[in-house]
Image (spheres, rainbow, N blue to C red):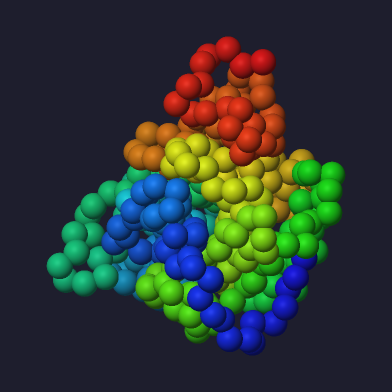
Amino acid sequence: MNYATFSRDYSAAASRRLDSVVNKIYINGDVNINNGSINHGIQHSIAAERTGDVHVHSQSIDNRIQNNYVVNLDKRKVEFVSPYVGSIGCGEGKGRLGYAQRNNGYLLPGPSGNYDNSQEYQQSISAGLLKKCRPVTQFVHDSEEVKGLVLETFEKLTGQQFPDNIEVRVCGETEMKKAHTANGGKWNPGIMGFAINRYPYPSTIFVKKNHLDALMLTIGHELGHVLSPRLSDDVDEEAKAFAFELAWVKTVVEHDIGELAGNFNIDFVPAENGLHDRAFAFVQDVVKKGKESLKVFWELSKGILKAKTFKAQVI
């Protein structure tokens, strides 16, 4: 697993623009994704809400504390989650550091006067794997800080060593922009990360600095894309990534890797809002009928299992 320092110049992938091979991760609510053919369009997005710089842990807006973000795999919706705050926490005990409890759904504060900040956003796919109320995790600034956990999780999940043809980079926004634009992509300051899938050739996952639990979740999903060739069907491709991500999170929980077991909820049920929700719901349905999520991943990767032709009977 290569965690090289982000210092070299990036050149465009030979004969392939970034937008045909990349999985983008957004943190804004104004995202247009082209889920086109196998050779065109972004494969998926992860949206999240951020009211300020990622290093700002609290911000008062209209007497409400709003900041930080969580991953959200529904490209059309943005989920707002209260920040890490000192005296407003979840669970028992005053002053416990945690996420503030919200009882009125998810609201995205308006970035401008023209935005309707009363619009409610439903809890979205994959973000639900992170508990609303969970312990605060360290903020990861460098890939070396998470390398050991990634290697451990992968090895416990698959029984194999991490592939030497997949590189994971944890970057700041400047570094992310440099890599993204140099590969022919159109930069958006809301991009949290992206993965260039060149399977079976070396692939790279770029992830923006984030809290450990959310970062591990993002890496798990992206690995689900780059561990095999992209599938021609968009739902199958997303289901493939979600299946690996679910297996990834279950492994973290079962082995309490990085002491993150208490941060994840592997039993949440997503709303049926779009392609990503349908893909994850499909994976959950197959798993509930008796098939292990890792097996679902491999069968989707090989074309043995398809979301559109799935029947109730699972062997």
Tell which of 139 and 149 is nearer to you: 149
Name the residue at 43% across, 34% down. 278
Q: Position of residue 288 (x, y in %)?
A: 60, 23
Q: Quadrant of the C terminus?
A: top right
Name the residue at 39% across, 47% down. 37
Q: Position of residue 83 (x, y in %)?
A: 48, 64
Name the residue at 47% across, 42% down. 232
Total marks shown come to: 0
Vertical arrangement, residue 149 with respect to residue 208, above or below: above
Name the residue at 23% across, 60% down. 117
Tell which of 89 and 70 is nearer to you: 70
Q: Quadrant of the N terminus?
A: bottom right
Q: Quadrant of residue 267?
A: top right
Which residue is situated farthest in the left direction here?
A: 114
Residue 17 appears in the picture as rendered: yes
Q: Quadrant of residue 94?
A: bottom right
Q: Quadrant of residue 41?
A: bottom left
Which residue is situated farthest in the front direction here?
A: 15
Please indicate whether residue 35 sits to the left or right of residue 179 in the image: left
Which residue is situated farthest in the top direction here?
A: 313
Q: Position of residue 99 (x, y in %)?
A: 52, 58
Residue 83 appears in the picture as rendered: no
Tell which of 100 and 2 is nearer to you: 2
Please indicate whether residue 306 sits to the left or right of residue 246 in the image: left
